[in-house]
Image (spheres, rainbow, N blue to C red):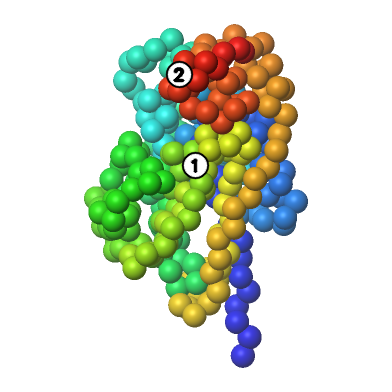
Amino acid sequence: MSSPPCERIALVSDVHGNLTAYRAVLEDIASRGITRVINLGDVIGKGPRGADCTALTRQRCEATVRGNWEVFVAGEAEPVSAGQAWWREELPAEARRWLFALPGSLDLQLSGWRVRLVHASPVDEFTRVQREHGPEQFAMMFAPTAFTGDVGPADVVAYGDIHDPYLRSGKEGTLVNVGSVGNQLDDPTPSYAILEGVPDGEAQAPFGVQFVRVGYDVEAEIAAARALGMPELEAYAIELRTGVYRGRHAQLGLTGA
């Protein structure tokens, strides 16, 4: 008796208004024949074209979870910086409403495993779990919470937020960070992940995780930000060119937009 066919699902995250990178990644996904795309949040903020990236997300992604930048930029709280105010103003009101109303968590059944998709953690959009973390944080990522709907522990958790892709497994389950499409910070090259398995399949069905890196025209994206008069351009340009977080630029003597 033959097994049901596997299906591939692309997971993208942390686009951050970088339309040039987003288009390149989505083109790569389509070239592989993958039709299911899920976005793990932070579609907007930091980059110049949040409105366009939101529209593309609504067109190409079957589901999207809310990230911390959706809360910062699309929420009702007053902007705390000129950049935040600019990114909010760039978004149409209807797009802001859609982004802020996104769910915080999404569960899939794949090859008999419960796969949980969140932006940062099952606690909320803001509780950050770095690549280097302790056993308590690792176990916490699989536990059900009020934020995830109290629907049972996860076997696989995929998240974004830290812009640093990795995979780690333990007795609690398998933890996947998919990296960032628009603001990668371990390396300038965007990344995304592909899950492969049988939807609603039995536990013995195959399951796999693949990471993909996709190059794009960084200078074209920086030129677009400059032409649009985006604030915080220098920090954005350095991050895109080097993959170094803006909090370290002064320490390392990195300058230039």
Q: Residue 74: image x %, image y %?
A: 42, 26
Three-letter amino acid code of the residue under disc 1: Asp
Seen in the picture, residue 31 relative to 216 is either above or below; the reply is below
Q: Nearer the viewer, residue 19 or 129?
A: 129
Up-down relation of residue 114 to residue 237 (above or below): below
Q: Position of residue 63 (x, y in %)?
A: 51, 48
Look at the numbered disc 2 and give the secondary structure of its residue.
Answer: helix
Query: 10 Å neighbourhood of mark 2: few (<14), some, or many (≥20)?
Result: few
Residue to which mark 1 is pinned:
164
Q: Secondary structure at mark 1?
A: loop
Mark 1 and mark 2: Cα distance apart in space: 21 Å
Residue 139 in sight from this viewpoint? yes
User: Which residue is more in the foreground, 92 or 68?
Assistant: 68
Q: Which residue is mark 2?
A: 251
Q: Earlier in the sequence, mark 1 or mark 2?
A: 1
Q: Up-down: is 240 above or below 210?
A: above
